[in-house]
Amino acid sequence: MANKISFCSIFAALALIFSYIERMLPLDVGIPGVKLGLANLIVILALYTLGAKFAFGINVFRIFAGGMLFSGVFGMAYSMAGGLLSFLVMYLLKRTGWFSIVGVSMAVGVFHNIGQILMASVIIANVKIMLYMPALIISGMITGILIGILGHYLMKPLKKIMISV
């Protein structure tokens, strides 16, 4: 159990670092909310190696800490909505066993954006923000696939390292 907690701490730190790195990358495609989702890589790897409880804790920690450090209350609200919805989807899809890590990651990218846009429409009280939805779904699919491919290649060496967990 101590090993699992140690890895959980490392994953949480990495997720927060990846959130910071992502904020520093100049990714401007003209659509608000489009991100690579680097921190989602850590959450997915945690789900597949540590289990749902630890992955959920890492996800909530990185959103809360990242919001407090980098984006403020509104940024945290958007991220929390996207993070919680996408985690639910991630957990359910993985549990079915029908999807690879790439398929799960793609769904995570899409549903993270859906959660954020739903929260934005509530906060700004304007449904016209939904016009961004098609672009955010496409960007979520693309970035989710890329993160999933990276996760796929990282799983084998990660499992070797975590053999004692």
Image: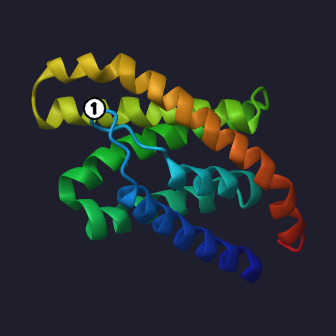
Question: Residue 7 location in percent, x, y?
Answer: 69, 74
Give the colouring mode of the picture: rainbow
Furthest-bottom residue in this view: 2
Rendered position, 154 above or below 146: below
Considering the numbered disc 1 on the image, is that residue within a helix, a strand or a loop? loop
Residue placed furthest toward the left: 125
Where in the figure is residue 112, as x and y percent of width and height?
44, 37
Residue 92 in sight here: no
Among the 4 quarters of the image, the one containing residue 108 = top right
Task: Judge whether 88 appears above or below 47 on screen.
Answer: above
On the rendered structure, is 156 left or right of 12? Answer: right
Residue 77, percent across and down?
A: 26, 49
Give the side of residue 94 with respect to residue 82, left or right. right
> Which image quadrant: the N terminus?
bottom right
Q: Nearer the viewer, residue 61 or 38?
A: 38
| Of the pair 104 and 14, the residue shown nearer to us | 14
Q: The disc labelled 1 sits on which kind of residue?
A: Gly
Q: Is residue 40 left or right of residue 80?
A: right
Residue at x-position 57% and y-position 36%: 144
- Which residue is found at the position 62% from the left and 62% from the top? 54
Q: Is residue 24 above or below residue 69?
A: above
Of 136 and 114, the residue lying toward us: 136
* Residue 76 visible within the image: yes
Q: Residue at x 21, y 35 (%)?
A: 120
Q: Quadrant of the C terminus?
A: bottom right
**Residue at the image point whose x is 73% and y is 73% from the top:** 4
Residue 42 image offset from top left, x and y in percent: 61, 57
Reading the image, the residue beneath label 1 is 30
How many discs appear?
1
> Residue 149 sits in which quadrant?
top right
Q: Is residue 27 above or below residue 131?
A: below
Mark 1 surroundings: few (<14), some (14-19) or many (≥20) residues within 10 A: few
